[in-house]
Image (cartoon, rainbow, N blue to C red):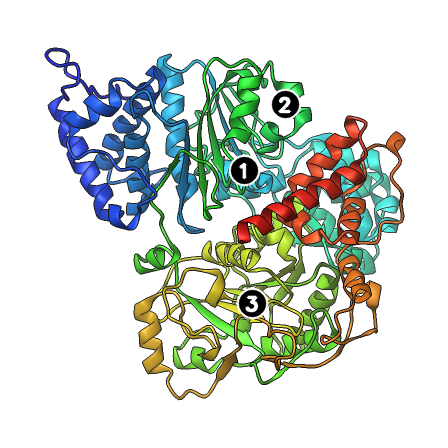
Amino acid sequence: MRPAMTILKESGSNSEPTPSFAALYRTLTRFLTDVFPPGENPQSPYPPASAAEFLSKRFVRAPEFHRHLACELWTLLREISRDGLKVNGKTLHDHQFAHLVWVASSLTNGQESPTSFFIQGAPGTGKTLTLGVLMQACIRLQTRGLMTGKVAYCTAKPYHIADKVRGKGMARRRVLRAPPYELTEKDINRRRLALCRMNSEFMKKYFPGPAWTSLFAQRPSTEEAARKVIEDYLQTAGLCVEKSEEPMLSNVVRVLASVATAVRGPFGTTELLTFPPIPDAACQIASHTGDAAFAIPPDYPLFARESIGITTATRGEAQVILEPATVFTSVQQIERYREEFHRHVEVILCDEAQRRQPVAFQEPVLSAGARHIPLVFAAGSQWYGKDWECRSPMHSFPESIRRGILPDLGVKLFPSADDVHYPAETDESLQQLLTSYFETLPAFEELKLPQPSDVNTLVVIHSRLVDTVVERLRTAYKARGSAATVRPFYGGEEDREALQIWFDTPDAGPNVLVSTASIVKESLDLLSLRHLVVGTRVSTDVLYHLIGRLAHGRGQQHNADRMLVTLQQFANSSLAATPFVAIDHGQPFPDGGFTWINGHALMSVRAFQRDAKRLKGIGDTVKVPAHRHGKRGEAPSITMACGKSLLPADNGKVIDPAVRSTASSMTHRLALVPVAHEEYDPQKGPPSHNLVRQWAAVCGGLAILETYPSIFLSVEEAHHHGCNPHETLEQKIAQLRERSHGLGR
């Protein structure tokens, strides 16, 4: 570790900068204002022009820890600039480096030095790596003995931490339990149970529990070695596998060789995913290679949830803690860990704080007896108007595309305003979706881009239709002679990592993943994703986050290249939930509707104008309706028709979008959740998530529950404190509904 740079001269004025710091300060602050002009970011504080003014007014009178951390950041910035902006094997983009300069210069402000920072950037622009550099600065301070407290890395999306901490290169080792991950007895049993779900009679006959465990003790690392181990076992046991059972035996071989894992298939089935063998599978490598944790040394005192990383110390002994954000927001966890964890936290790094305020993280630390307010650094894609002391300059979607960081987005909208719109989740609307899915897109033919059905695709559908859509897509691709692979995703942690690896592994045909908005809108980084299909009703906020998943796909290949958002509109959906409204695109569109060429680039002004000339007269146009439903008595802006519901609660029932009775809307709310045939019994524990969702649906608060999942925690905590969780739910929903109405005035 290199020594920290000297900022102040040892003689003369105590605020006189060293020549090296003055030169660095001048260069980096000029870089900051070039990347983020102050006039375009009035919400952000900017440093003074001269280093001497910065030191005298902001640095020397700042709290000691602020000065130590700022000094370490300036040191790191100098090193990164000398190393060609390389961090964790990646070259920082200008906006990432500028955000780090902004943090270093904003951290000290005399006696008013801030304690909370929000770093804002579009999805897919590398905010996690920025937090990783802050983690590196904290670890250096701990190593130098200038930071005695803990640093906590967390996120409101716990399913994201694994990728951020371990990195993509470690994900396959984690799924297959290759070193440095160990294969536990639980893992061995889980693999056998998955194979039993595929063919229970076969497993009982040939591989009973004790025999299965003894086979895994040999840990063969190749299919050839695994087949030899199994052949020896079968011969010793006097067993002979029939020819008709050989496909199942091949599955067992792949699982034993740790080249395959089981995932859930449609309609309760179990399917096998086979991966290429891991090179040097027995080799021990660094366990934390993700952008958030690359700076953590292999044996550093660290505590992490089992699903997140490899722990080297207890929670009390650890210097770095990797946990979901619930460790700061759950009353149970705060009470349980306040002595060994909360009271010792000095810095909190939060990747996507969502709607949480900084006090949500700081209050548990202070109430546990900490001497100082912890510093909180959060990175997020959307600003929710929370009370963060310092809000960074913003890096937008269009700016990211202009700089080549993100690929452009094309948009396909259907049906046209004058075509028939059916209610969502009806047989007619699903057939309309499948027909549109395989239609040739003339704009992509003109641009010499692969057709949307021929690229890796994420299909977002209603939760009760995932299995149906998977089966119909498989049938349709098979009828076309395509080698496409279609799989469902239901949100399981083990499946999540396995399916991400499968999706990004090149195959003979396109990979298609079918899931729901609530599961995937913020939880999957699919690097090879090229096409997003939204075939269910979503809000503008949810659509924004879904497009954020698309933005995590690979970069632009050539000038005409772009991702594609395919959006279906319904007779009973929000007409404002379109990419034309949900994201900052910089294009002028009339509120009363307009004509759009499907596939036209939306985000880059240059590409938008180029497409307007090149695709003019192509013929494949759609009328985008006004972004509002008409007032009572006005003619609707779309052509509506009835449809037969596919949802279990209304299966076969004709849904008339023009009739919006209370009973009908209640039925639809309940159709969104599994029917919970249970009653709340305090003696049996807190209410299940399904029961809570049903309670929310009955009182019309399901949308609020999905927007604020922390309500689940409030309900659970009400149970543990002897309160009525049903009443707590209704009160919480009423409060949040009133608050959202107040913000909308």
Which mark is nearer the camera, 2 or 3?
2
Residue occupied by mark 3: 509
Residue 402 picture quarter: bottom left
Which residue is more in the foreground, 465 or 214? Answer: 465
Which residue is more in the foreground, 301 or 271? Answer: 301
Residue 628 pos. (x, y %): 56, 70
Residue 450 pos. (x, y %): 46, 73
Q: Amino acid at mark 3?
A: Gly
Residue 10 picture quarter: top left
Residue 356: numbered disc: 1
- Cα gap from disc 2 to disc 3, whole angstroms: 49 Å
In the rendered view, would you say 639 is above or below 529?
A: below
Q: Please name the residue shown 45% across and 51% down the image.
A: 123
- Cα gap from disc 1 to disc 3, whole angstroms: 42 Å
Which residue is more in the foreground, 600 or 244? Answer: 600
Q: Amino acid at mark 2?
A: Ile
Q: Please name the residue shown 43% across and 51% down the image.
A: 124
Q: Amino acid at mark 1?
A: Arg
Local SS, label 1: loop
- Cα gap from disc 1 to disc 2, whole angstroms: 16 Å
